[in-house]
Image (tube, grey):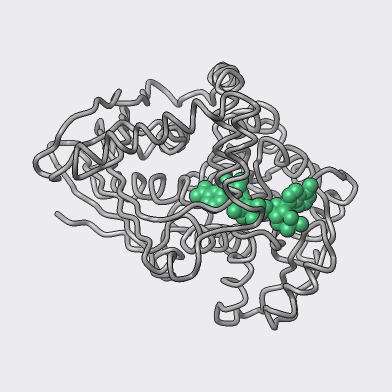
Amino acid sequence: MRYATVVSPERPYDLVVFGATGFTGRLVAEYLAARPPLDPPLRWAVAGRDLAKLEALRKALGRKVGLIVADAGDPTSLARMAEVTRVVATTVGPYIRYGDAVVRACVDAGTDYADITGEPEFVDRTIVRYHDVAEAKGVRVVNCCGFDSVPHDLGAFYTVRQLPPSVPIRVEGFVRTRGGLSAGTWTSALDAFARTAQTRRARRARMDTQIPLRGERKVASTRPQLHYEPRLHGWLVPLPTIDSDVVLRSARIDPRYGPEFRYGHYLRVRRFSTLVAGAAAVGGVYLGARLAPTRALLRRAKGAGEGPSPEARARARFEVLFHGQGGGRTVRCRVAGGDPGYDETAKMLAESALCLARDRKRLPGPCGVVTPAAAMGDALLVRLQAAGLIFETLE
Ligand SMILES: NC(=O)c1ccc[n+]([C@@H]2O[C@H](COP(=O)([O-])OP(=O)(O)OC[C@H]3O[C@@H](n4cnc5c(N)ncnc54)[C@H](OP(=O)(O)O)[C@@H]3O)[C@@H](O)[C@H]2O)c1
């Protein structure tokens, strides 16, 4: 592992929020604008493809922030954006369409990068294309800094830290969420459902280039099975999201996850009827997304830039319970917060970007295309706790 090169403090900005005129990007900008002032003051800018929208956003924020016009389809504009900042935090998605050029611009400019993708194909392609060059240049490319996958990645990291060191460890995570979807998330999910063959190919390519494990360490999934868990009063459904992969990648990078680490990731639902209804809904959307005409119809279900209202977000919640076992000890931990998809995602991305920009001396070390826990570990945990997310040990 390489340590980051020192990025010149002469760059005009600490961080740039790219996609700030979109639904989630605006929440990130609002979060940063509402934060208490830092010492030295945070130098930041909002970026997007439409100057008039950026100007309106700056007026609404009521803060002295820079404006940068950049388009994901214009590499020169991306290079200009990446060169004037230490960190780019991007919410421009679907990432499989727009993400690659942004990563490339950041790696070329020696600029750290954070996003909120949950798209496995994009992350796998990013690892294959950019890990080695980013590592050699001392750049951190950190995908999945939103609800995908910060609570799970840092929750597993936190759980591991409650267990004895240097013993085989098994962790399971049980997620429960309530909240709505934005048009951006909806479109990204439809794209991902339509690209299962490409996703499988990207995964195989990434597995072939997997970062080697140190010594004889083993890292693997527990191979979760659907079952009823009386202690949790609910059904546990294996959850094939990117979160499990992110946790396992963190464990591969960090020897503190022990000589043998296994992780299982589940959705927790109270009633079997909810499980059946949820599976039918996801199955229906999946089938609809596979054919271009029905996918186009499904896309129209949400208008561009739409997302859950402030009232709906105020009612939204998430909770992830973790069961960890190792060295004869068992721990139960909990990560919880408010609206997972948007308010808390905006907080997680903003704090990740601040962490990369301002906590450089406290970062654990690994560079390249790395997970939130591997890139930021305790420094991000401390920030998120201070920002109101709950990470606690129950017993
Ligand atoms: N992991 C998570 O938990 C999580 C949570 C929330 C969102 N997300 C992901 O974040 C992404 C954004 O979601 P959202 O709801 O914020 O979507 P959105 O409201 O549609 O915002 C997308 C943004 O991308 C910008 N954009 C589109 N094409 C561009 C281009 N060629 N150049 C520059 N900017 C461009 C749009 O600019 P304009 O404003 O000019 O249209 C807009 O600002 C999605 O991929 C979603 O899946 C992930």
- 82 shown above or below 198: below
| Rendered-image quadrant of the N terminus | top right
Q: Which residue lies furthest to the left in this view?
A: 230
Q: In this view, does 269 lie to the left or right of 71?
A: left
Q: Is residue 29 left or right of residue 313?
A: right
Residue nearer the viewer, 219 or 347? 347
Q: Quadrant of residue 357?
A: bottom right
* Residue 240 in picture, x, y percent from top left: 40, 31
- Of residue 122 and residue 1, the one placed in the foreground of this image is 122
Q: Which residue is drawn at 67% across and 30% down?
A: 132
Q: Residue at 15% x, 43% y: name it.
A: 330
The image position of residue 12, as x and y in percent, is 80, 68
Give the vertical position of 361 relative to 284 (above or below). Answer: below
Whether residue 112 can be seen here: no
Residue 289 visible somewhere in the drawing:
yes
Q: In this view, does 13 lie above or below 288?
A: below
Q: Quadrant of residue 252?
A: top left
Q: Where is residue 178 in the image (x, y as percent from the top left)?
A: 35, 54
Horizontal relation, residue 167 to residue 83: left or right: left
User: Which residue is at a point 72% across and 69% down the rendered structure image?
Assistant: 44
Q: Which one is nearer the viewer's eye here, 248 or 166?
A: 248
